[in-house]
Image: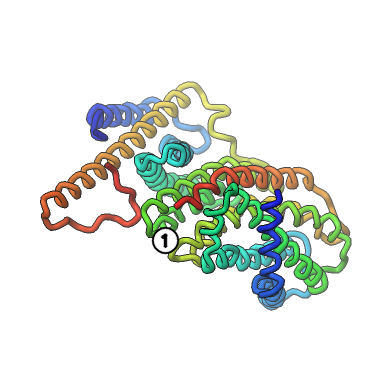
Amino acid sequence: MYGKGLRPLSIATVVAFAVGFSLVFFYAPLEADQGFIQKIFYLHVPLAIVSLAGFITGGVFAVLHLRTDDRKWDAYSYVAIHISVIFAVGGLLTGSIWAKGSWGHWWVWNEPTLVSFLIVFLLYATYYPFRYAIEDRQRQARYASVFAITAGAFVPLNFLAVRESASLVHPRVFATAEGGLPGSMMLTFLCAIVSMALLWTTLVKFELSAKSAQGQLKRLRRALDAPSGPPSSRIAPEVH
Amino acid sequence: MRTVRALLGKDMALELRTRESVPAMALFSVTTFVIFHFGLDRDTVDGDLASGVLWVTILFAAMLGINRLFVAEREEGGFDAIRLAPIDRSVLFAAKAAALIIYLAALELVAVPIFALFFLDSVAALGPLVSVLLLADLGLAVVGTLISSMAVNSRARDLLVPLVLLPLVVPLMIAASGATEPLLVVGGPGYHRFGTWLMVLGLYDLIFALVGWAVFDFLLED
């Protein structure tokens, strides 16, 4: 049932990316200061924004899990955070490349957005050892939800604190992304962000349907007394 | 309110008799100052370096107490007793956070004067520093209680607390050291953006106190 609508969604994602990247390379003008390296902005910023939105979505799913006590929402929350962590790695790597290309360093401490993003990533990276440390499945699901809610509340707070600290010593030299974008860049950027959000949704759905298929296979095997397959992951929730 | 007081009284009596958390935290902080002295090779520190030394030491000393906060409950069946008692479970959260605040205040009563003795030229900054310490203690206490209560029921108790707590308290440390830095510069305490940082600390405390209070119930269900 998780596979429903997966095919149109995947096609929509591919189309959106094709349109988005053609806009990036053939339509959006070259940025006067930075030149070609600025194009990575259409990959980096959507990756970062979608992963942050994904973290918060994971927190919302966790609230639903605690309220309804339905294990399904724990799986949603786990998968949302899992995919967002992968997106966050992509965001950090592309950010690093961009920093090297445009400012000459692989890492800059006085760019608050970058630093806050790193802290958020470090926090969510502990989600896996955290789940792994709790053996009882039900308790694991509940504690993971508490973690996801706490971390979801942490995301905006962290951005506030890091931004304050940066403006203490350094003025914000790098203008924010949106501010003064010309129309053609803005359109391309919006396209890129929509395609990235579509990709995130597709991957989440795909992962959920794979997990659900695995769970069904396991139950069938058990019912038929067949030898069970490879042991399932100890941290990923089971989907029914 | 009465139940909070009763649970808090239980923790205080336990700590006064066994003396297992606060003395260890205090001793740890003093030793850390000595190590900082040799590691930095400095007789006095000021400004950002001073606030860094102070906050890193307090944070790591606090971690010792946070690690042990729920150990007695786990080992002696205190969690079951709370579940059986006809009380709101969030009461345990409030009582434990209050106990942790008291531990941290006791730690700082020892650690901060010794820090001043070892590293500072003047003690003029210690007055305003109290407000920063109190707000940071509150934040450390609510987040620490939440993480500690989860970690104590896991396989990797003493691993999980530092792992999850450190990234969570980064904003708290940014704000606390941001407020402390101008206080400890050479030439008397300064108050550059002091109010902003206290507000960030207060916001952090408020948000995590509310989150902890709201979700603590689910951690005790079984």
Q: How is the image coloured?
A: rainbow
Residue B116 drawn above or below residue B184? below
Q: Residue at x 56, y 45 (%)?
A: A154
Q: Is residue A216 left or right of residue B170?
A: left
Q: Residue B2 at what x, y percent from top left?
A: 71, 51
Q: Which residue is mark 1?
A: A133
The residue under label 1 is which amino acid type? Ala
Residue toward you, A57 or B41: A57
Hey, which quadrant is residue A235 in on the image? bottom left
Dot 1: what SS?
A: loop
User: What residue appears at the point 66 percent right and 58 percent down from the top-left corner?
Assistant: B7
Residue B129 lies in what quarter of the image?
bottom right
Please give the chain letter of the residue carrying mark 1.
A
What percent of the width, then of the height, locates residue A236? Answer: 33, 51
Is A56 positioned to the left or the right of B64 in the image? left
Question: Is A208 left, or right, of B195 in this rendering?
Answer: left
Query: Image height check: is B92 above or below B77?
Result: above
Along the viewing direction, whichever of A122 and A46 lies nearer the viewer = A122
Q: Nearer the viewer, residue A118 or A207?
A: A207
Residue B186 in view (yes/no): yes
Given the current orientation, which residue lies at the most extreme top position? A183
Q: Position of residue B81 (x, y in %)?
A: 55, 59
Q: Residue at x 44, y 29 (%)?
A: A189
Residue B33 in sight from this viewpoint: no
Which residue is at a point 36% across and 53% down the rendered structure image? Answer: A137
Q: Position of residue A44 (x, y in %)?
A: 44, 40
Q: Residue A156's quadrant in the figure? A: top right
